[in-house]
Structures are given as C-alpha cells and as structure tokens.
C-alpha cells in the first residue's frame, strides 16, 4: 500500500450543483481552459468526486459508504474505435459518453455494489448489489484498521503475553487476503469477508528502529478478523514443526536480527559512480491527451498511457510508424499460491491486482534511485475509501536505457564494422505488496519489439519454524524462519490490432522431415503453421519449437507474401500445482496455460475475474475461453501467462535479489526489412566512452604485474 | 576471420640458438626483467615461435608446414591445483612444466599432426600423425586462398559467364566447411578435406562499394575445392525451386540491393546521445599474471582470463570473496545445422569453434562502439599458418554496466524505500564468422551470480530462390533470396569447484502433494532433490520445475544445513532436428541434451570433440558421458547446452537484430544471506540523474497538451 495524500478539500467536496457544468464539458467540446476529457483519460479528481456524490445520493443520508474503486469505465470498443481512428487521421471525433465504474460497500456490511455512472449525463446508469461469495478488494484504510484491530484485541494480547517477549518489543501485524480453500472447515463460516493476520516482532534489541525487518521474527499466532464486525473472530496457532500440529505460544526465543537497511550493513566501499548523462535531453516526447492521460512518442512508437487502481499502467492504441499494433495492453492478473498445505497457510493464495491493486500500491518513485538517466515521471489520481480523489505522485517513470549492441556486422574482407546500439524506452511502475515488490515495465526498442518485464524483489512472506526442522515445502532462511515455496503466476492481457482489428493466433512448429529421396541424409526440417480457430488455452512445446504468433491474415508482407504478424516470446513456467479440485485452481483461471485466446468482449479485462477476493472461480478467462468462440480473423484477446515457482534460497533473505521475467512481442514478417536499419551507427563521437588504460607495469614480488586502471579521456 | 597483423619480424624470426635461454626462464624461476610464465598464461610470441621452430626441426628442410594451432597445453589438473592453491595462499609455488599444443599439416597433404612441445625442456614431447577422417580447422590464409581459387577457376568462370552479369559486377565467394553427411555420394570421395563455396555478387549498380551486402544477391553456382590440390574438383548447381532440381545458371536478374551500411540508409535523426560516465573511473582492477594472462578483480569476484585460438576467452580459478567456484569456464562448442535437405545444402552444419575458432575470429573492438562507459581492452597473440605469432588487438573488452534495480523494498508503514542497483561486470568478445556475428560475454553481478550471454547478430547465410516460390525450410527475406532455417546449438563448459574440487549435480523438482489429511485442500507441493550418480545427458522439464544444481555435499549452509550449491538457469531449446542416423547428429555430441555431466579428464575440453571439421562423431561429450563414470562427489564437468532454432524473419535481413540468450549460474544456499545486501543504496547524489520536466502546457487545436521535455538538472 502506498502512503496516500488527500487532495485539497476543494476537489473532494465539489457540490452536485457544479456537476452538470462539468459533465457538459466532457464530450470534448470545451474551449480553452476547460479540462477536456478524452474517452481514455483516467478519471479526474472532479470526476471521482462527482461519481462518489452520485452514488452517495442514492442512499439515505448518513449511510456510510466505503468506496473500493472509482475508475474510468472504458468505452465499448465499438464506440471507441471510430473515435481513435478519427483522432489519428485528424478528422472530427465522435462524441463518446464518459462513464465511471464504482465498486462500494455499505461499510461493515456484506453489501457490495457495482455501479456505472454516466459522467456525461450526471447520473447513475446502473447500480447492482453483488451476490453471495462476491467480495471487494482490500483498501489501504481498511488494512491499517485490520492491523490495529488484530493487535488491540484482548484475546490476541493474551496469546502474545504467553510469548514473554522482552519489555518494549513491538509486534507487527501483516493482514492477508483470506483464501477460499477450506470454506466452512471447523465450523467457521468462511463465506463472509475475512482477513487473516500474520504476526511478527521487530528486533527486540533494537525496538526503536521502525524499519527493522520483522519478517526475520515471525510469531505463531494468527488472528482472523471479520470485515463485518471488524473484530477478531478466531485466533489460529501456526504449525511450526514438520507436521500439522499447532502448539500454543510459549516463551519466544530471540534470534539475531536480519536487517536490510543500509545502516545495519558494512557497506562496500569499492563501487565507483556510474552516471547516465543525456546532454541533449531525452529522445522521447510526452504530451497530455487528457487531464491525466499521456501520449508518449519515441523512435516511431506512439501510444497512450493511462493508470488505474487495479492494473496500474495501461497502454492504449499502440502504433509503430503509423501502423496499429495493440489496442490495449496491461498486466491483467497475478496469483501467488503457497505450498504449505497446513491450516491456515493453505489460505495464502493472493491475487495482488484483484485483492488489492497494482495502481493503488504503486511507489512514489524517486529521481536517480529507481532509474538512471533523463527521467520523466507521471502522477496519478485514484480514490480513497471515502470516495475522495487522492494524489499518487510519480507512479510511473519514463526513461531510455542502453541495452548493449542492437546489431553488428564486420565485413572481414574490408575490415569495416558497422554496429548500432540497442536503445530502449522504459515505462516503469513499482508496486509494494506489503512484504513484496514487483518492478513492472513496458519496454520498447528500435527494432519494433515491445517487451514486458517483471522483476520480483522485496521480502519473503515468512512463518515460524522450530529449530532443527526442515520441510519439503519451504526453505529455512534464518534461524526460526521458514520461507514457504510459492508460485507467482502472471497474466499479461494483449488486445491486438496487428495492422487492423481482425487478427488470428497461429502457432509455428518445427518438425524433422522423414527420410525420403528429398531428404536423403535426414537433416531436413520444416516449419508448419497451425491456426487457432476456437477460443481456448494453449501451451508451449519446446520440443516442437512451438511459437505463437498474432497474425493479420489479410495483410501480406511485400517481400514474401506471408501474413504480417507479431510473435510472442514468453519463458516457460510450471503451471499451478494446486490440484484441479482446489479453489486455488478454480480461482486462478489463467494459471493452467501459457496462452489463452478469447474473442473480444467489452468488460473482460481481468484473467482471474472481476472480483478475486475469496472468489470461487468461473468468472475469468478459462470460463470465457470455454465459450469456444470463433477466434479466426476476429477481434481477439491474447492472454500471456508466465511466472516463477519460487523455491526460496537463503540468498533471497532478508531481501531478494531481483528475479527477472520478460515477455517479448516481436515482429515477424511485419516489416520489409530490419526496422532498426536506420538507427545511426554507434560511434565514439556520440557515445563518449572512456579508455581505462593500463598504466606503467610494475613487477611485483609474486610475479604479477600491477596495472590498476588510469583513466584517460579520448 | 579478423584481419591479421604480423608481429615485428624480430619475434617471428627468433633463432633456435636463443631458445634454450628462453626455455630456462619459463619455470617461474626468472628474475627481474624476465617474462615470467604462469602455467595458465597464454603462449607468448616467443613461445609460439619456439614451438613452431621445434616442430619445423622435426622435418626435412624445405618441408612446408601449415600450422593450425599453436596454443597453451594446459597443465593437468593434478599439477595445476597445488600451484593455484599455493598461489592464493602466498606459499611457494611448485614448478609446473610449460607446454604447447601444436596442430599442423604438411601443407597441401592430408598429413595432419598433433604435437605436444615442452617449452620448459625445449623439446617435442609427442608428435602424432592423425588418422583417416580427422581434419584440421580452417585458417584465415587458407580461406582467402580458397576464395581466390574458386573465382580463378576456368570452369567456374564459364558458369558465371552463363549468368550474363552486367559489366564490372564483382563476384564474391564465401567458403564453407564441408559437412560430413552424404560422404561418397555421386561417386565423389568426400573423405578428403574439402571446402564448398557459395557465390554472390555485389550490387552490380554499385560495384565500387566494397561493403555492399552480397548476401542479398546469391548465385546458384557452388564450387567445391580440394585442400590437397587447391583446385576446384566439382561445381554444384544449387536447387532454386521447391524441389531438388538444380538448373544450370542462366541470365541473372538483378534485383534491388539490400544494404546495411549507414550511407545507404535514411538515418533517424531523433536519437539523442546517452553517455555512460564514470567520473572516478571503473570499479574493476586488471593485473597481469603472465605476459598475456590477466587477473580481474571486481566486487569480491576474482578470476584469471586467458585467450586461445579456439575458445577465445577462458576463465580460470573463479573465486568469490575468497571461496572457489569454478576451475575453468569457456564456450566449448557450437553447431549450426541447416534445414535444407537438398544437395549440397545438406552439408551446411558448421562448428564455428572447432572448424575455425572463436579466438581467431575475434573482432578488434573499438572504443565507444561496442560498449559504453569506462572500458579496458585486452589483446591477444595467436599464431598464423606459418607458425609466426601475430597480434590480435583489443579482442576482449571489460566494462561495467548498470542493469536496473538489484533489489528494493519499501516499508509501507514508514514509507522508507531502500533500493540498490544491479551493477554488472561484462567481459566481452565479439566474433565474426564470415556472414555471422556472435557477441559473447561473461557477466558478473553483486549478488554472486555469474552469467554467460550470447547475442546472435550479423547476416543470414543466404541462397537463391526462384520468384514466387516458398519452401517450408526457409524464409524469403528479399526478392530471390532464401534464408534457410537453422539451429544454433551452444555448449558452455563449466568445470566447477563449488567450495572445493569434489562436487555433484542434483536436480530439484516440484511436485504436487497427493491429497491427504496433511494436504486436505490439495494446494500442497514439495521439492524433491535427486542426485546424478553417473555421467550422462539430462534434460530440463518445466512441468516439473526441474532445476539443476552443482553442489558440494560436504559443505553445509550455516543457516539451514543444506549443501552449498550453484544452480543453472538455462533457457530451453529444441534439440537437434537432424535424425539420429545422420552425421549431423553424430558429430554434434552435445546437441541432444540440455545438460551433460561427465567425470573430469584432462584434455576433454570440446563438447564436439577435438577435430570437428568433417568429423564422424564419437569423440565428444556424448562418448565421454557413455563411460557411465561415477559423478557423485567427484571432480566433474558440467556441459550446459542452449540455442535457437532460427526461423528467419524478413526483419532479420539485411542484418539481424540481436537475439539474446543467457545462461546464469546462481548461488543457492551458498551464502548465509543476500550477498548484495552490502551494496550501497541507490541515491541521486551518487547516480546524478536528470529530471525531464514537463514544460509549460500549450493547448493545441486537437485538445492535446504539448509538453516536450525540457531538461533541468537537479
């Protein structure tokens, strides 16, 4: 959760009287000084407030409403496409109704609602009470409150007392979403919205250090809190041995701390500065297409970027050299099921986007800390639980990076080498999910390639383990600390428009040719292309060199007549290990295939379904794929899954070196030659590198020659 | 082939009278001013000359000897290990005999010899005539001569005449190693050492451009040249249709050119400079451990680097924080079989290291073109065909790079973020194999990880194809030009010494637990470790999350008692598609498994065997693995295979954007915590980044707000 800053009250308290005026300005008719709203522009502070006011007005005065989401309700593709085409061609743009999507609770009840508000018309279009087993995401205010409730509870205090912690020890409570497996076990009704908390202590010998790593000191007490009553309804003891016995708390043994903060380290002193300097500034341009939406142009790429509570960054209308590539791109979902089958750990299976939100957890990025070079930051405005807008400053950073050589060839006959570097544009957001961090980045290169990179870092979610015990479902990373194995399974949603709206997915495979008169020596092999005709889940097969391509069969490459395409390079991952009867499996509807292909439908954005918290499944991509729709030369959506089965190492503690995952969308017979051919060659006059020369040699007594680098600028 | 520069004659003509004096100084006994030779030091110019002289002296005067390899014959591990241990501990080092390894022909005969020369004793220790079917690699002088012979041949000229090329057209001949499949087909004896040439023309409309890309204009004539006679023994016509019919040459249709040189492009003008500046210099140190061998230290890493004709860069004695990790690391082999089964294309199956050499083909790297920042270059000295030393300047570059965030955590309760960047050391060499380039780099990071990166770039090896034809074994990349599918299969040789000389390889797999009282909800899963007891070939299995680890079972992690290990992260690849009866398959002994594990034996360095040119198989890693040696807690070697099945895209022509492959060796329970914990935090005061601020907004007529970045230094 990021720390929230409320906007000035003026914005939050906009009165209903003002609304019609604001609404009237929205269909892009306004003149100078009017905040024009584009159909894809993230909601403005005024629009957030207006949406909240319209919802509040539906209910009796003094009804306490807890707003979960107040976000842009994106126009249907039918409405938006003509708008975007007109916009690109400079034609008059049709009016598109501007709407917001609102999810809210009547506070401390199970009454969850989903509403659509027309901002253009200043009214609530629909307001739906959602059924049983549908639960809203957590929000920051709620999480802070759950932490407080857990620690203030007398029963919890009594359990903590049994630990006989040193005087002044600070106990920390990490609330977790409550997984769906094991509903109603042990007589507890888990059909209600619940939180489970895991407790830790800060280093008792350094209690004043607020950034002490409490994950090095887990306790075996886990309170469960009801959302409805905001009370502790149960206190679980955690099993700490090799079996599922859960012992009551007893005298806590204080182990050494394991801190990540720099003042606790003996820092290296031999790392010299490395500065990325762009003396003429950055090569990208950023402009606003709406009050909070931005258009980014860089090296023939052009796209819009939005930002919302759930997905964080969203790219729209991605073009290269004027040719359409992608209608919409975003991280759609993520699931992290844990390997420990014992109560209550079996419930650890978080959907970080659906249960909380990549946008709302985005870091406020700091200049020169999170990236190097010439950096531009974008800020966002989201909603808090009271329906007020609040600022999320610097949630996206944009910069260029050098990623080594782009291409090179030396003509050995003449000795002439031509080399170009691989400059990339990085559009990055970093999210903190309590203990864990994800660094999420869209990357673009000069060869027409679009990449999505995830770096997993942060701190492992830990649990206590008795000394001398080892278990096959986790790694002891510190005395008394078990880091359980867990899977991270991501789903990237790719809504393509490769040279137009109608696309297909095909896969290529390479197969050995049988021996024949044509293949007398047995070395021949062929590539066979197979189109996917119906929606479904599909898998990689490295033994067949299977490669999925998104193709426009109506547009042929001028050189070889093959349909233009973008291929998907995605690393393999182990599919979800939870068995098919588990709720883990049923809920994570994307976790069983590398690729899903579905027909496009408005409002199908999240692979795990719209409401993942304590979900039961059946509302995500697996369900949509099961429609068995025709996906051949249709408006389709491609869902690309990837992940890690994280078997923790001691080296991943107390903070984990980044694990990097990368998906790449690469042109295949889309261009008529290497699209980076026109990148200027890499020359010293441009790059200004420095020769580290070997100084005068001095023969040491050991026979070594000492020649520590002496810098000399060329 | 790189352009060679001979050393001053003084070195090349060192007389035999001087040799005893030089030899006497070699066993590290020499005083000041004597070039001390370390057992791992690459051969010095004097040693190369001395070796050649000793070999020449074996033969009657005026025998023309063609030297293929004059290189360091590395000491046996038994001899070298005590030396290295003594060296690290500062103890007196034992004397190790210094020897060279020489491969040579009696010129223009099939008489190939392999000799071992004792430089310490100034004599030839062994001199072996190698048997039938064993052929030496190609060398640069020979390749130039083969090119010349092919084009000077009257028969070839007559065939070229049939093409009726425009006046002044320049024909280019690319010699290729001659594959082994199809021996004796059509009555030709292919048991002799042969070359096949593929012919091209430079753009006839721009004949004076020596760097015109001739691969855009392939001809259908392929002369075959005998090494023994240096004459054309056969002229093949190339099939250019969909079947295996090969038509004689006829009137050549000049198609448009497809150039990669910058003066042929309309270059982008919107890329701004990006400079990597290290104001305090580089963080690494380079010293000499011998005349041509270097020790590199950086961020707790310490290793030696050598360089030889075949492998190029070799790392020795790699330590981290004083702990041994790897005895020796190098790219061991590479095979590139092509998919076209038709004569004579079925013979295209190059072993770029064994048939030519990664060292001898290394580029002379240019400051600020091949990498950015503060760069140190290493040069090498190899041998030419006359047995003379010659300089290979700047064949290795060493520099640091920033690779994004190393780790980050934000304490959401306090808002404090700690972030460190991921600085890497890159030790890089780039090789040009006629049309193709490989960028080869060992990379090291601050988290104890060692990576090997290959970037494949350069120009596709092309062949002619008739207009309107498409084939399933290649891609038309330009009018009349087919780029055949081909596999690149690499073998990285890892000779480990994880905390000591005796290691084992184990693999971890993650498996779902069956449902039980312990796993009532079906979410549990466990990791099972399986040791490899006998040498053999082993494969990845992503469905089981199989991960191979090199382990020292005798050394336990202090935190969790698990054996210390390094795991191997290697991307999957499609195994060789040539069938098991083909010579392609028999020769590429590493191409059928992701991992080979063998017991260590001196002299087993090259996965495809010592002599790959027209080889028959049976002399490489598959054969060694078949010994079924015990490899449990022994001195072992691990061979890591990876590759690409390159299905060319139009975008890969006329020069290919880099395809990047990366192998990673990562600590697993080797350290007692994150080894990069002591990296200083990433701060603006150190990084000196620049804020690209949004300038004053100007509302455009389209409603967009223009805010092209205005740089302001913070």
Image: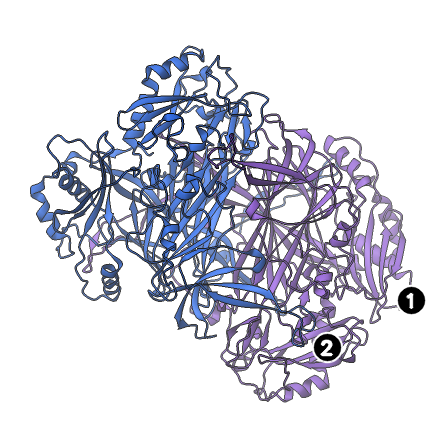
Chain colours: A blue, B purple
The residue lying at 49 percent from left, 46 percent from top is A575
The answer to whether residue B547 is above or below residue B580 is above
Nearer the observer: mark 2 or 1; the answer is 2
First in residue order: circle 2 vs circle 1: 1
The answer to whether residue B61 is above or below residue B247 is above
Classify residue A363 by image quadrant: top left
Instruction: Give coordinates of residue B162: x percent, y percent.
Output: 63, 89
In the rendered image, which residue does mark 2 sit on? B224
Which of B317/A62 is in front?
A62
Callout 2 secondary element: strand
Q: Residues within 10 Å of mark 1 (few under 14, many from 20)?
A: few
Which of B692/A31 is in front?
A31
Classify residue A707 by image quadrant: top right
The residue lying at 87 percent from left, 48 percent from top is B21
In the rendered image, which residue does mark 1 sit on? B61
Q: Which of the labelled discs sits on residue B249, or is there none?
A: none
- Tell whether A436 sits left or right of A395: right
For the question of whether residue B43 can be seen, the reply is no
Callout 1 secondary element: loop
């Amino acid at each position: 959760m990021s720390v929230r800053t409320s906007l000035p009250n003026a914005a939050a308290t906009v009165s209903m009287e003002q609304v019609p005026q604001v609404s009237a300005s929205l269909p892009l008719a306004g003149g100078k000084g009017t905040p024009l709203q584009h159909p894809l522009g993230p909601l403005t502070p005024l629009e957030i407030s207006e949406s909240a006011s319209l919802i509040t007005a539906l209910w009796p005065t003094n009804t306490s409403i807890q707003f979960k989401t107040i976000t842009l309700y994106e126009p249907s593709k039918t409405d938006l496409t003509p708008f975007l085409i007109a916009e690109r061609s400079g034609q008059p743009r049709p009016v598109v109704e501007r709407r917001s999507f609102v999810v809210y609770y009547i506070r401390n009840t199970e009454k969850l609602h989903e509403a659509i508000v027309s901002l253009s018309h200043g009214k609530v279009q629909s307001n739906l009470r959602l059924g049983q087993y549908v639960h809203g995401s957590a929000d920051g205010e709620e999480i802070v409150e759950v932490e407080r409730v857990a620690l203030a509870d007398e029963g919890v205090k009594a359990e903590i007392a049994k630990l006989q912690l040193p005087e002044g020890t600070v106990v920390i409570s990490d609330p977790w979403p409550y997984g769906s497996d094991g509903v109603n076990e042990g007589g507890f009704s888990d059909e209600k919205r619940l939180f489970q908390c895991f407790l830790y202590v800060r280093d008792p010998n350094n209690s004043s250090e607020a950034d002490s790593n409490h994950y090095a000191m887990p306790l075996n007490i886990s309170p469960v809190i009801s959302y409805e009553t905001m009370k502790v309804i149960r206190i679980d003891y955690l099993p700490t041995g090799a079996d599922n016995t859960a012992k009551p708390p007893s005298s806590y043994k204080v182990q050494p701390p394991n801190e990540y903060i720099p003042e606790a380290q003996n820092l290296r002193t031999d790392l010299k500065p490395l500065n990325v300097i762009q003396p003429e500034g950055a090569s990208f341009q950023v402009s606003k297409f709406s009050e909070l939406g931005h258009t980014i142009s860089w090296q023939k790429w052009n796209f819009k970027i939005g930002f919302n509570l759930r997905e964080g960054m969203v790219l729209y209308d991605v073009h290269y050299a004027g040719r359409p590539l992608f209608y919409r791109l975003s991280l759609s979902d993520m699931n992290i099921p844990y390997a420990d089958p014992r109560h209550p750990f079996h419930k650890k299976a978080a959907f970080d986007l659906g249960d909380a939100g990549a946008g709302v957890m985005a870091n406020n990025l700091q200049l020169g800390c999170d990236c190097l070079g010439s950096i531009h930051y974008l800020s966002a405005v989201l909603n808090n639980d009271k329906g007020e807008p609040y600022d999320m400053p610097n949630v996206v950073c944009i910069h260029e990076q050098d990623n080594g050589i782009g291409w090179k060839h030396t003509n050995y006959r003449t000795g002439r080498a031509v080399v170009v570097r691989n400059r990339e544009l990085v559009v990055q957001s970093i999210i903190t999910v309590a203990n864990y961090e994800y660094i999420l980045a869209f990357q673009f290169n000069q060869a027409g390639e679009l990449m999505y990179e995830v770096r997993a870092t942060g701190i492992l979610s830990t649990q206590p383990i008795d000394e001398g015990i080892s278990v096959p479902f986790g790694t002891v990373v510190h005395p008394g600390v078990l880091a359980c194995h867990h899977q991270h399974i991501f789903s990237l949603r790719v809504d393509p428009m490769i040279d137009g709206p109608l696309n297909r997915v095909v896969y290529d495979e390479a197969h050995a040719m049988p021996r024949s008169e044509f293949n007398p020596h047995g070395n021949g092999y062929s590539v066979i292309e197979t189109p996917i005709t119906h929606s479904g889940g599909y898998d990689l097969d490295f033994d067949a060199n299977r490669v999925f391509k998104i193709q426009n069969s109506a547009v042929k490459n001028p050189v070889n007549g093959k349909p233009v395409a973008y291929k998907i390079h995605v690393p393999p991952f182990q599919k979800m290990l939870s068995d098919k009867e588990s709720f883990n499996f049923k809920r994570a509807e994307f976790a069983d295939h590398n690729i899903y292909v579905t027909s496009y439908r408005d409002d199908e954005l999240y692979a795990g379904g719209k409401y993942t918290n304590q979900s039961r499944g059946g509302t995500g991509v697996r369900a949509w794929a099961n429609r068995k729709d025709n996906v051949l030369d249709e408006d389709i959506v491609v869902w690309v899954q990837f992940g890690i089965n994280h078997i923790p190492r001691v080296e991943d503690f107390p903070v984990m070196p980044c694990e990097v995952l990368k998906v790449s969308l690469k042109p295949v017979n889309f261009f008529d030659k290497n699209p980076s051919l026109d990148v200027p060659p890499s020359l010293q006059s441009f790059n200004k590198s420095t020769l580290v020369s070997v100084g005068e040699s001095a023969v040491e007594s050991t026979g070594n020659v000492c020649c520590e680098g002496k810098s000399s600028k060329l």
